[in-house]
Each structure stands twice: as structure tokens, then as C-alpha cells.
Image: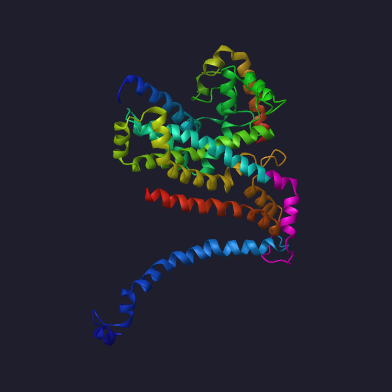
Amino acid sequence: MRSWREKGLTYAVVVPFAIVLAFPFYFALVTMFKTNLDLANVEHSPYTYNDLRAGSTGTSGTTRRRSTSASCSRTRTTRRGSSTR
Amino acid sequence: MEARAARWKPAGGRWRHALESRRVLALLLIAPAVVFMALVVGVPFLWAIYLSFTDAVGGSLTGNWVGFDNFTSAVRDDNFRRAVRNTLIFTLASQAIVLVGAAVLSNFLVKDFRGKWFVRFLVVLPWATPVVLSTIGWLWLLDSLYSVVNWTLARLHLDHALVWFLGAVHLEEGAQVPLQWLGRPNLALVAITLVHAWRILPFAVVIFIAGRASIPNEVEDASKIDGATGIKKLWYVDIPLQLPIALVAVLFGIVFTAVDFAVVYILTRGGPFNSTQVLPTWAYFVGIDGGSLGAGAAISLFLFPLLVVVTVGMLFFARRAQVT
């Protein structure tokens, strides 16, 4: 490795490839621990685990900011989910 | 039995001589593989050829001879033509992506950097996982309502821009904001192509890295002494040396993509409106789901000429790659 610039270029190419190629597996790993309710809520971040027990407004940043719309959409999704299954 | 054992001498016996001879022993050792391949590949293949000339239906393995009717009616079918077109699109488009991606990525993965083994591990994952499992993952990632891709695009405020772009390049006109990746004909083509490319890329990268390693260091040193740098080195040294092995990777990729059933079947079931059917899924839907065994066999046999050409090319280039 000749210089830090070359090293930086290597990381700039290799890291995006690795993220794209491995992302479905990361997603599968995170989803493994989620509840169905968490998955079915489109306001929740799909990238992280959202703890539903922490409070009625959820814990992800976007849900906290718009708690009313989030809880509305959650009840909607829940009802739809239970009616189809 | 005991008497025979007593008479047995190390150098004696007709069979021992037979086993010593190269011709007999070689045949004997290769026979299990040949018999196995004949039973597992040869018999079903010949049976498929026979079925394609009959009007056999599901539940029976025989039928009345109908000549080339199955082939002619398959060719006249619009769905079949679309399946042929899609097979070619998926194969060529995904292999183009794979070729460029693997060339770039393998170039950087041979360098030394911290965490190289971990990056290599992440890169190889898609190839190491059964295609069915990873495709089910993609099914969720591209879901109509819970799509992670759409979620991310919406959070980055890129969703409307992407819809506008798709309309502007006439790829998918009239699309709406939660993009239906698997529910619109052209978007589904794009999605399936990308999943194929995602799956084959690690395989091509591994082969490219192996090919790079097989080039002796002396060539590198000699080109350095001769003052070859940058584009000229790439064009006159790197590409000619790596071309045979790259072709092997691409030909393997073509075979893996062209005969693949799982990706299309899991992601779209050939839909919407049979717009993403490929030859394997179309043969399955006609022959197994629809029960027209003869017609399905005829459809699947249309893959054969393509695969013969690719296989001959593969063997040819594999031999050349070994020599250099």
C-alpha cells in the first residue's frame, strides 16, 4: 500500500460493494428478532430493532416525532393484519 | 473358500492381472460416475425429448405421438416468445453488471487493507447461501407495502425523483410512489435482473481473484521494467491475461442465470400477466401446473441449443485458461 489515498480509494470501492452484497443477510438477522407488529408498521425503521414494549409511541426517531400518525397507522395495520390472517 | 484362500498367491490370478491393466482399472473406477450421470441426467433428458413429441398429460409418462406440434404451438405462443426474450434479457443484462462489478471489485480485493478477510466474507455471502433463501429475503426487501428499498427512498426523499426518472427514460410510465418493484412489468424485469446480478457477482469475483493469482509475478515485474503503466498496462497486459478466466466466469454465469428457476418463481411467479416468465418457469407452469407434460417438455428443450453452445465455449476456454 503506497499511500493513504490509495487505501481510501480501496475502502471507497470495497465498502459499498460489501454493504450491497451483505445487506439482505443483515436484514434477515435483524428481522429474526422482530415482532410481527414491528415488521408490519411501515413507520418503523426496517434497519433496527424497535422495542414495542417501551411505550405506545414506539422508539424509532421518526415515530417519536409523529407519534399520533404513527399510532393511527399502527392500529390500522394491526387490524388489517389480523383480518387477513 | 478356504481352499481358494490358501491357493491365492500375490502375483497369481487372472483378475489381479486384469486389475493391473490400466484399461480395465480405469473403466472400473470411472464406471460409477458414468452410470450415475446416465441415470440422473441421461434418462430424464431422453425422456423429456420423447415426451416433447407426445401429447402426454400430467399423471402419465406416455402419450400419443404428435410430431413437432408441441414445438410449433410453443413458438406461436406470445407468452413463450416473451419467456425467450426475458431469458435473454436477464442473462445478458445481469452478466454485463457482473462482469463490470467483478472486474472492479476483484481489482481492489487483492490489495492489502485492514479487515480484508471480513470484506471478503461479506462479499462471498450471497453465493454461499442457497438461492431460495436469499431470494425469499429479496421478496421481503422488494415487498409492495413493507419494502425496505421504498422505505429508504422515501426517507431520503428520492422516491418521487425515481418515479419521475423512470417515466423520463420510458422505463415505467405511470408508476406511483410506493414503487411496486415486483408488480409492474418493467420494474419487475429490473428487480429480477438485479437479484440475479447480486447472486452471481460473488462467484465471478472469486474466479477473477483466482485468475489474478495465477498470473506469475514476473509478468508484473517485466511490464514495470518496460514502463507499462495505467491504461496501456491494463489493455496490453492485464486484460489479455485475464480474458480466458473472465470468459469462464461469464459462461458459468450465463448457465446459472439462464437455467435459474427459483428467482423468478419466488419473486413474481412469472407475473404480472406473465411478463417476467423465463423458459424454466414457463415450462414448469405449462408442463407441471397446467398438466400439459408434452408441451412443457418441448418448451424446456428450447434451452438446450443455447446451453450446448455455452457449454462447448466453457470447456474450450477452461482448457485455454489452464494452459496459460
Q: Position of residue B64 (x, y in %)?
A: 74, 67
- Determine if the magenta segment contains residue B72: yes
Q: How many labels does the image show?
A: 0
Horizontal side of B57 relative to B193 (left or right) equals right
Task: Name the residue: 74% across, 45% down.
Answer: B78
Q: Which of A76 and B61 is in front in this view?
A: B61
Q: Position of residue B174 (x, y in %)?
A: 72, 25
Task: Name the residue: 31% across, 74% down.
Answer: B20
Which coloring applies here? rainbow
- Determine if the magenta segment contains residue B94: no
Horizontal side of A13 relative to A61 (left or right) equals left
Please, is residue A49 above or below residue B305 in the view?
Answer: above
Res. B278 image quadrant: top right
Q: Position of residue B322 (x, y in %)?
A: 38, 50
User: Visible in this render: residue B227?
Assistant: yes
Horizontal side of B162 relative to B10 (left or right) equals right
Residue at the limit of the structure toward the front, as seen here: B226
Please, is residue B27 above or below residue B279 in the view?
Answer: below
Task: Name the residue: 33% across, 80% down.
Answer: B15
Please, is residue B133 above or below residue A4 in the view?
Answer: below
Horizontal side of B310 relative to B119 (left or right) equals right
Task: Name the residue: 72% across, 40% down.
Answer: B273
Q: In which quarter of the image is the N terminus of chain B?
A: bottom left
Q: Nearer the viewer, residue A29 or B227?
A: B227
The residue range painted magenta reads B58-82
Q: Where is residue A18 in the image (x, y as percent from the top left)?
A: 44, 30
User: Visible in this render: residue A25?
Assistant: no
